[in-house]
Image: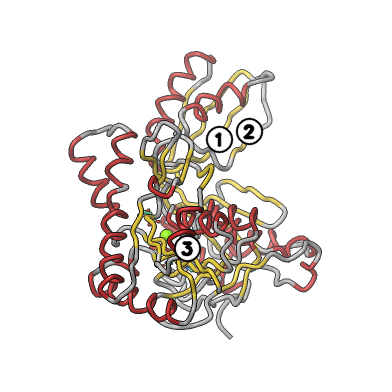
Amino acid sequence: MTLIVEKFGGTSVGSVERINAVADHLMKKHQSGEQLVVVVSAMSGETNRLIGLANDISDNPPAREMDVLVSTGEQVTIALLSMALQKRGNDARSYTGGQVSIKTDGVHSRARILDIDGAKIKSDLDQGRIVVVAGFQGVDIAGNITTLGRGGSDTTAVAIAAAVEADECRIYTDVDGIYTTDPRVVPNARRLKSITAEEMLELASLGAKVLQTRSVEFAGKYKVPLRVLSSFVEGPGTLITYEEEGSSMEAPLISGIAFQRDEAKLTIRGIPDHPGIAHQVLGPISDAHINVDVIIQNASAKGLTDLTFTVPRDDYQPCMEILNRLVKDLGARDVKGDDKIAKISIVGVGMRSHTGVANKMFKTLADNEINIQMISTSEIKVSVIIDESLLDKAVQTLHDSFELEKA
Ligand code: ADP
Ligand code: ASP
Ligand code: MG
């Protein structure tokens, strides 16, 4: 018997109708002989609604209570879907993350899964039940409810697939696979039949929210067979592959373009340049659990240097406060910031064996009068920071110039 983990995102379970449609789909699969573990998100818009309620109550809602609150969205969906399945004759069981021992660290709102005990799930499966598990949530060692970061239900699904050694993990969403870029921004984007886990990891971490980054990390680590499909139309979707390195000779130059809108940039200027300065500036930012992304340190002039880095826009204000304190402590000149920037990245394993890819990107942007503010590269990606208002144009023109469109 094949054991499959299927995950349905918010839009796929966004109404009673949709939940019924998912239940019909699952019954068909179950009757065809698949053992099924189902992971669901909150109904679309629900997580945002809950966050909004918290913000109406408090300017700074306590992280622990926030997780208690936002995890309720998924609890609604597991119960409704299980009811729909029971109505159709399957003795389905719903479980919260804690009930199936999804153990995480204690970092609220961005916890990492440490361990899952698959035994309970397996015992239900053996009794012919469809098992429905709440995505996005777990419990820490002290029993506190934690959540895994936005989009975290993908990670729940892949982690469960690894724990129960599933034959495949299918992520059902509102697009029919992974595209060369977000099809909502570039209408002539092309669906990929497959993509390497390595490239998908880059695309996800650079902003393609179709899969949460951690889910791709998990998939890579445990080699979970992973596919992204539409819950609205049938089709093969996109398969994540685990090819050996070295096969990049025939790979396309660029596989995809990812972007991130909600970014901010901060510069601390005129810092006395001596060993340890990057640590002194970025240490307190990291201690505040803020993820720093692109970092540039200027060559020092007259013993002074500038350090510029980007952070998620939500972290702009706290970062600004930390840097303003540091200006005094370190004897720096001042702090500058811009919270209207975006990052655009081209990704492809083909870059390993071809030169000139970055240059082509820079020329395309220059030809379209898009100014590059920062650049960051790695073996299989080039990222640039640009003004947010130019983002859509930049994505479209790069998509055109690298000829990624549909044939
Ligand atoms: P779900 O609620 O099912 O988890 P998400 O909204 O998290 O769905 O992710 C699906 C969305 O990801 C799509 O609607 C699409 O707009 C966006 N997306 C961004 N980049 C890509 C890409 N390269 N391929 C497909 N979808 C993408
Ligand atoms: N409901 C959560 C969110 O909106 C988790 C998820 O959908 O994956 O981010
Ligand atoms: Mg998602």
**Residue 121, x across and y down, in percent:** 46, 57
State the CA–CA distance, disc 3 to disc 1. 29 Å
Q: Amino acid at mark 2?
A: Gln
Q: Is residue 245 above or below residue 303?
A: below
Beta carbon of the mark 3 residue lies under 8 A of ligand 1: yes
- The image quadrant of residue 356 is bottom right
State the CA–CA distance, disc 3 to disc 2. 32 Å
Q: Quadrant of the N terminus?
A: bottom right
Q: Amino acid at mark 3?
A: Val
State the CA–CA distance, disc 1 to disc 2. 6 Å
**Residue at the spot of label 2:** 297
Q: Name the one closer to the observer, 240 or 303.
A: 240
**Residue 217, x across and y down, in percent:** 59, 53
Beta carbon of the mark 1 residue lies under 8 A of ligand 1: no
Say which residue appears at 48% left-offset and 70% top-offset: 35
**Residue at the spot of label 3:** 210
Q: Name the one closer to the observer, 221 or 92.
A: 92
Sort mark 3 into few (<14), some (14-19) or many (20+) by Cα contacts within 10 Å: many
**Residue at the spot of label 1:** 308
Q: Is residue 133 left or right of residue 34?
A: left
Say which residue appears at 54% left-offset and 64% top-offset: 368
Say which residue appears at 54% left-offset and 77% top-offset: 190
The quadrant where ligand 2 appears is bottom left
Residue, far left: 57
Q: Quadrant of the C terminus?
A: bottom right
